[in-house]
Amino acid sequence: MSLSTKFGDRRGALAAVVTVVLLVLGGGILARAATAPGPPPQPDSSQASAAAPTPATSDPAPAESTAPTAAPEAVVPASDFGTLMAPSAPVALRIPSIKVSTKGLVDLNLDDKGELEAPRDAQRAGWYVGGPTPGEFGPAVIAAHVDSSRIPAVFYNLGRLKKGAKAIVDRKDGTTATFVVDRVARYPKAKFPTAEVYGDTAGRAELRLITCGGEIDPRTGHYADNVVAYAHLVG
Amino acid sequence: MRTTIKLGTATLGSALLLTLGAGMAQAATSADGNTMAKLRPVALNGVDASGTAMVTVTGNRIDVTMAASGLLADSPHAAHIHFGAEARNECPTASDDKDGNGTLNTTEGGPAYGPIVVSLTKSGDTSPKSALAIDRFDTAPGGKISYERGSINVSSDVAAAISAGKSAVVVHGVDHNDNGKYDGETKSELDPKLPTEATDPAICGVLASAPSGGVQTGGGGTADNNQALGLALGGGLLLAAMGTGAFATRKVTNRI
Ligand SMILES: [Cu+2]
């Protein structure tokens, strides 16, 4: 505060400084709040259930023209299980219909409560290293933030994802795993369907895309729900 | 001035950090569970194969699905769930090669994954008694295994060990000399009628528990009530600025 004393009137100068600070902070926060993109989109209930489990028949689902319809599996399954790929870690994720394109996926592990940790960086998606790599048999899991404390993050638009949309994972070995979305659902975190999300995928290579959704729980300051997109490998 | 602003943002920053802080969904706790093993080549045995096994535990019942590829084609592959209370509950490493012959046989893997507790046969008995029931295991057409078997009964101890992430899935059968079949002078330590190639561990993975609960993937910056908070906070600070500003002005006026 030697600066203020120089000017003689300590309190006046301090008040001026405080004023500037408040103006800057207040104005900034106000501007941000006013121009904010609004709460993240939430999945429509019509997206929550999968199309009839019968594979490769004409999909009775969505009138979503943006998303290419689930292409009938072109690759011939090796056995009674569907298309499967050799293990290779994901390096990038693209979901054209909701304009997601993210590189440099981080590794996600379980925390000491056995829960999946979220990426530290809100602008990066993460892959659960304890699960299969995308394209392998089982549910590969990619999670990303819906927003940071200030701005939208990688999976801001996940709730807008529609059945039939494609999610494309570029892998370390140079190959690409293409998945088609089966459904998108929202669950209260307290009733998260662990078995459905992380459990057996009945012979298919699948992908789970997870982010936050719903309302902010005022007690925790966190979103009350998770949005989960379920997809399966087509090639 | 710089210090003052820094202080201001620091305070605001920690307020935001507080909102970001702890708190998560409750984890379901039960002996039931979903487990998954990433099957990877067993050390030293040089099999370029991989796969995934998923085991769902419901009481004393387990349901198993497993896919693998890259195995010796059209040859029986014994597959088991291994668990030992005394074992390390992991897949063997090169240091488990007790006889130093450069490969690992099933027994050498014992200290890592323990004894057989479930035989993943395609039909009939699934107990350790069927450990080498070669005619009832998958023969990996094209080197691939697509295995599904539900309602296998296990003891409570085994169910608990699997749920706790302590068991391992091991698929056996290694073509060490790459001649397309199980052969060789060395006999299996488990059954002298079989070559060791038929029983050596090929791929292995620990059945780890699936994540519990959801994921904390939101900072809340775009949520409705946070925007309201932003408006209120921002507006409030502006009002406060008006107040201190007026104070400063008055001081200046007074001086003149
Ligand atoms: Cu075994």
Image (tube, grey):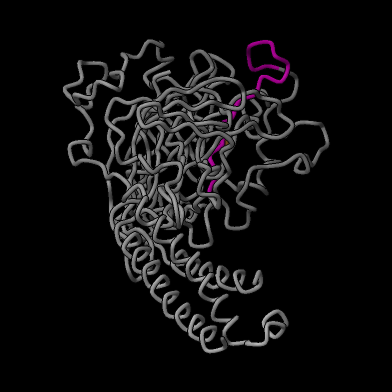
Quadrant for residue B71, please give it: top right
Q: Is residue B6 left or right of residue B68?
A: right
Q: Residue at (21%, 16%) from the top-left corner?
A: A57
**A3 left or right of A57 in image:** right
In the rendered image, the vertical position of residue B170 relative to residue B71, given as above or below: below
Assess whether residue B109 is covered by the magenta stretch: no
Residue B223 sits in quarter: bottom left
Give how far across and how far down residue A95 sits, in percent. 41, 29
Q: Is residue B178 magenta?
A: yes
Which quadrant contains ligand 1?
top right
Q: Quadrant of the C terminus of chain A?
A: top left
Q: Indicate the position of residue B147 as horizontal and vertical percent values.
A: 42, 28
In this rendering, position of residue A44 left or right of residue B195: left
Looking at the image, which residue is at 29% across and 22% down? Answer: A66
Answer above or below: position of B58 versus A52.
Answer: below
Q: Is residue B221 visible?
A: yes
Residues shaded magenta: B167-183
Q: Is residue A153 above or below residue B26?
A: above
Q: Quadrant of the N terminus of chain A?
A: bottom right
Name the residue: 27% across, 43% down: A185
